[in-house]
Amino acid sequence: MEIGIGIHGITVTPPVEGDDAETLRQARADAVEQIVAVTEAAVQQQKRLAIAAAVTCRSMVAGAMLSAVLSVLEPRTRLIVGCSIDWSTGGRRGLISMPEVESYKQGTPCWADLSASGIEAAKEFYSQLFGWELDAMPAGPDMTYYMARLQGRYVAGMMQQMPDMASAGLPSYWASYLAVDNADEAAAKVAEAGGTLLYPVDDVENGSGRMFFAADPTGAQVGFWQAGSHIGSGLVDEPGAPVWSELQTSDVPQAIRFYEAVTGCTTETAPAGELSEYTNFMVDGKPVAGALRQPMGGVPSFWMIYFKVEDVDLAAARAADLGGQVHVPGFDVPGVGRLAVLTDANGAAFSIMAAESAGTR
């Protein structure tokens, strides 16, 4: 007889020689210990392998958490987003009137990158879905970081999952990054604000910038980027480019206090769509990202990345043809547009969004 216990995509099936209750309890305890050991070893290995290359810090725990997140996406079709996006001022960014970006103000989402269990599948999927061209850049021994280019500007990054992450069964995931003016000053505020510094401030090679990775008090993990020669996404609010970032958290008030303390942003909370409350992170009085309380308990907090498309339903169908899955089919949010939640060919979750046309506003 075997008992299988699965946590974060890892399954251990210890042998059980008897059916008495004590043997069963001990078998389950042994299985949990094995799972914890595998996960902790993978986390430690990830920390050792963190590399200095443009926006490369990997948060393994966030990746493991997404396996739990995906299990509850489908029942949440109408609760995923209630964004009050100001499309007239550049949508998610709120700080620009043109899609080309030359700099980011502190507290603004500035970059997203993918840790892919199968990098070749990821390259094919996103290049076909969004029209990305991928530039390969050395990122350490036997590692390559791919910069996704659209209309001549970089919009996102991706790289192959670390070997121990794959062997531990951790899923692919998208990580989000917030702009900061001074990484050292921002990192110094993390602990006092109730967060945890996961990866200390480090210089990225070739003067690209400085960065660190942290977990907010609710467990959502996020990168912080001080721009050097690389500002982050050079194109936004265009089909195939980032359009919105959203924190889905177990405790919105606790989370927003952290981001306000670390980045100096402000927040505004109001009803939006079918949500009784939706919080916008504000920079210079303009919305730059959102936050909502997860409607289902037990789901880890995380940041969701949204990419703009011209037609949500066509893009979702195309994603499915390319080996992805549609977890939440296209739905309309009045005053915002049409959205859908997908996973790519490796199972990484992301969302797509098409702005509401002027004729339907």
Image (spheres, rainbow, N blue to C red):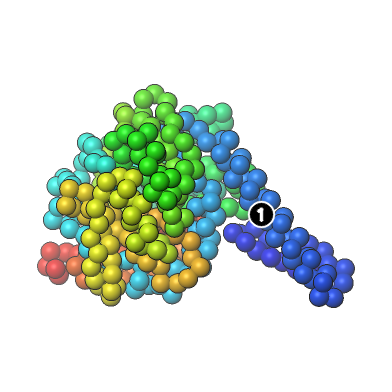
Report if residue 356 is visible in the image.
yes
Which residue is depicted at the point 40% across and 67% down?
Answer: 294
Give x and y (percent) for residue 92: 24, 54
Which residue ends up furthest to the right in the rendered image?
17
Can residue 146 be seen? no
Q: Residue at x 53, y 33 (%)?
A: 143
Q: Amino acid at mark 1?
A: Val
Q: Nearer the viewer, residue 125 or 195?
A: 195
Report the number of numbered marks.
1
Could you say which is closer to the camera, residue 119 or residue 22?
Answer: 22
Is 341 situated left or right of 85 in this image? right
Residue 42 at x, y percent in the picture: 62, 45
The residue most toward the front is: 192
Residue at (30% x, 50% y) in the render: 260
- On the rendered image, what quadrant is the N terminus found in? bottom right
Kindly indicate the quadrant of the structure image that contains residue 223. Answer: top left
- Where is residue 202? Give x, y as percent: 44, 31
Say which residue label 1 marks: 36
Element type at mark 1: helix
